[in-house]
Image (tube, rainbow, N blue to C red):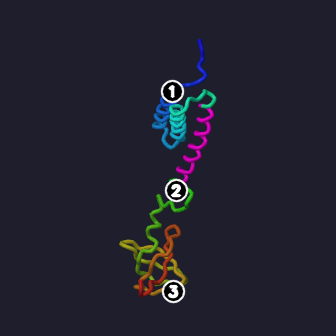
Amino acid sequence: MIWSATAAPWAWAVAAVVIAFLELPVPGSYLIWIACAAALTALAGFLVDLTLSAQLTVFVICNIGTCAAGYFVYRHFDRRGRGDDTVNRRDLDLVGAPATVTEAFANGQGRVRLGDSIWLAECADDLAAGTAVVVSAVHGTTLVVAAKTRGV
């Protein structure tokens, strides 16, 4: 049996397709970038007659380049590290909502009506019942409110 010192560009093209299909059951991995490197190696093989060692060198260089590009693509779309994830944090939707004091505030503690519910609330000022307030933060089941200014 005689081993060829080169691989046909079609072999690299088929490898690219097979690797790309392997990405389907494992989405989010880097297999698609390896498939791109194999496709670029096939393209280089179609353009220039390369030896097997040259093809492997092109594949390794393309693989490093496409995987590095993939890192930056995934990093751009990854939002986990930004701290603005509000999934399962419906209490954050209350910030900025208008409310009305139902029980006068004494020593910074009182109750407010927000929608159809009565909430425990904290405020730096002592407020009378009926005062319009705005929710500025939520601590557990206690709202932090501030008196609503006339312009708001």
Relative height, residue 81 to residue 2 (above, below): below
Q: Mark 1: which amino acid?
A: Ala
Residue 126, label in figure: 3
Q: Residue furthest left?
A: 116
Estimate the x, y position of residue 48 in percent, counting from the top left.
55, 32
Q: Main secondary structure of the magenta part?
A: helix
Q: Mark 3: which amino acid?
A: Asp
How far apart are labels 2 and 1 at the CA level? Answer: 38 Å
Start-end of magenta stretch: 55-75
Of mark 2 and mark 3, the one earlier in the sequence is 2
Q: Secondary structure at mark 1?
A: helix
Marks 2 and 1 close (CB-CB < 8 Å): no
Q: Which residue is mark 1?
A: 11
**Quarter holding residue 119:** bottom left
Q: Nearer the viewer, mark 2 or mark 1?
A: 1
Residue 31, label in figure: none
Relative height, residue 93 to residue 38 (above, below): below
Estimate the x, y position of residue 24 in percent, counting from the top left.
45, 37
Q: Which residue is mark 2?
A: 79
Q: Residues within 10 Å of mark 1 (few under 14, many from 20)?
A: some
Q: Residues within 10 Å of mark 3 (few under 14, many from 20)?
A: some
Of mark 2 and mark 1, the one earlier in the sequence is 1
Q: Nearer the viewer, mark 2 or mark 3?
A: 2
- Say which residue appears at 55% left-offset and 61% top-offset: 83
Marks 2 and 3 close (CB-CB < 8 Å): no
Estimate the x, y position of residue 87 in percent, counting from the top left.
47, 58
Q: Secondary structure at mark 3?
A: loop
- Say which residue appears at 61% left-offset and 27% top-offset: 52
Between 122 and 40, which is closer to the camera in this rendering?
Answer: 40
Q: Residue furthest top?
A: 1
Q: Secondary structure at mark 2?
A: loop
